[in-house]
Structure formats: C-alpha cells, structure tokens
Image (spheres, grey):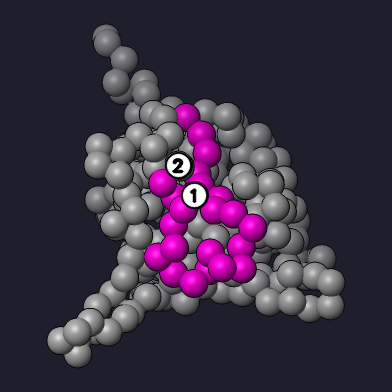
Amino acid sequence: MSRGDPTGQTRTVTAASFVPDRPTLASLRRAAAGCTACPLHRDATQTVFGEGARRAALMLVGEQPGDREDLEGRPFVGPAGRLLDESLEEAGIDRGAAYLTNVVKHFKWQPRGTRRIHQKPSWGEIAACRPWLDAELAVVRPHALVLLGATAAQALLGRDFRVTRQRGTPLDAPFAPLVVATIHPSAILRAQSEDRATERAAFVADLRRVAEGLAAAQAASRPS
C-alpha cells in the first residue's frame, strides 16, 4: 500500500516492520496475526498464515485464503483445498510433509446476499504482504516450490508471466532448486463440467512431475 510522508513523497507500506528478527515459523505466525500493513485485515476474520513442516521439501503457494480458510484460520481447507488434497494424493505427495501458504494472508471479499465472494487482491495488497512469503521461503528453504495460479506465479516471477504458457515445466528462479507454476485448484472447480476431468488430470500430471523431481533429488543426495 502507498502512503504520503511529510516530504510529500509516496512510500510503499509493507509488512516488513512486522517480521521478527531471526524468524521461525512460530514467531512469524504470531507476528502475522497482528499485521495491519494493508486494509484487508479490517474485513477478515483472522490472518491465515502458512502451515506445514519447518523443513518441508515442497512448498505450495496460492493466491489468498477463501471463506472457509478465513473462518478456520488454516490454508487450503475449503473446496479448492479438498481438491488439492485429492490431487496431491493421486500424484504421490503427502500433504503432511509439505508447507502450504498464500501470497496474501487475509481474505479479500465482497458481500453477495448472505455469501462472501472472493475478490482478487490488488498489486498493492500483494506487495504489502510479500515480506511474509519471503520470510516463509527463507525459513522453510524448500527444494521444490509450486506456484498455484496466476497471482502466485506473477507475484514471484513478474507480471508478464503466463501460467498457460509455462505450466508444469521447471523454471529458472532463485526461490528453490525446482520451481513450477500450474493452475490453482479453484480454476478446476470453475471449469465447465465437460472440461473438469481434463483440467484435473493435467493438474495431477503437473504435481506428479514435481514429485518425480523431488524423488530424483533425494536419490542423488543419498550417499553412494
């Protein structure tokens, strides 16, 4: 988010001042609970921080928490999260051994009757929340990073990145030895019913390639 300072210049306000020195996942989670770096905290029930193993070999990053995540305080527990769980299992990946998080830690929504409808976060909101993701990456240090959907991919790889052109292929990026972008599972849920099976199969195939890459890296690291 941007604010004016006494000199008349515009400065970008981010969560950097909330990130603790020498962070751990526990201290990051505690600090993020009080984050007010952008206005999204005002309408959210709570911060939804990342969840998973401290030294997970695999990190998955989505856009933002949804309605169920906002209420429960955990990432990927709604319909898209259930589809992700099923797809991970089919690809041979144990969710319990991975770390799951989002680029933005608060639910952005607008009311529609009695429902809360997801709204895409702005670039200012993404930038404000970025220090949390950077800190998570620094603490977890995953071997493989999977970016779920355009918002997550563009937040880390630049606004010109297109998931549809490079999905499922290893990318040259500094965040992990293996970086892959694919669609968000919510995109499968939004697809036409006749296309859903095809989209899901392609998503599982992307995850399976990541699993194979992790297995190959682990095999190469074992003493001969």
Instruction: Identify whether 92 is placed above or below 201.
Output: above
Magenta part of the protein: which range?
A: 31-53
Tag 1: amino acid? Ala
- Image label count: 2
Residue 162 appears in the rendering: no
Q: Position of residue 42 (x, y in %)?
A: 56, 68
Q: Nearer the viewer, residue 224 or 104?
A: 104
Q: Position of residue 163 (x, y in %)?
A: 47, 66
Mark 2 Cα-neighbour bin, 10 Å: few <14, some 14–19, many ≥20: some
> Viewed as shown, does residue 59 lie left or right of 65?
left
The secondary structure that dominates the magenta segment is loop
Residue identifier under label 1: 33
Tell me what residue is drawn at x 49 percent, y 49 percent: 33
Residue identifier under label 2: 30
**Secondary element at image label 1:** loop
* Disc 2 + disc 1, Cβ < 8 Å: yes
Q: Nearer the viewer, residue 139 or 167?
A: 139
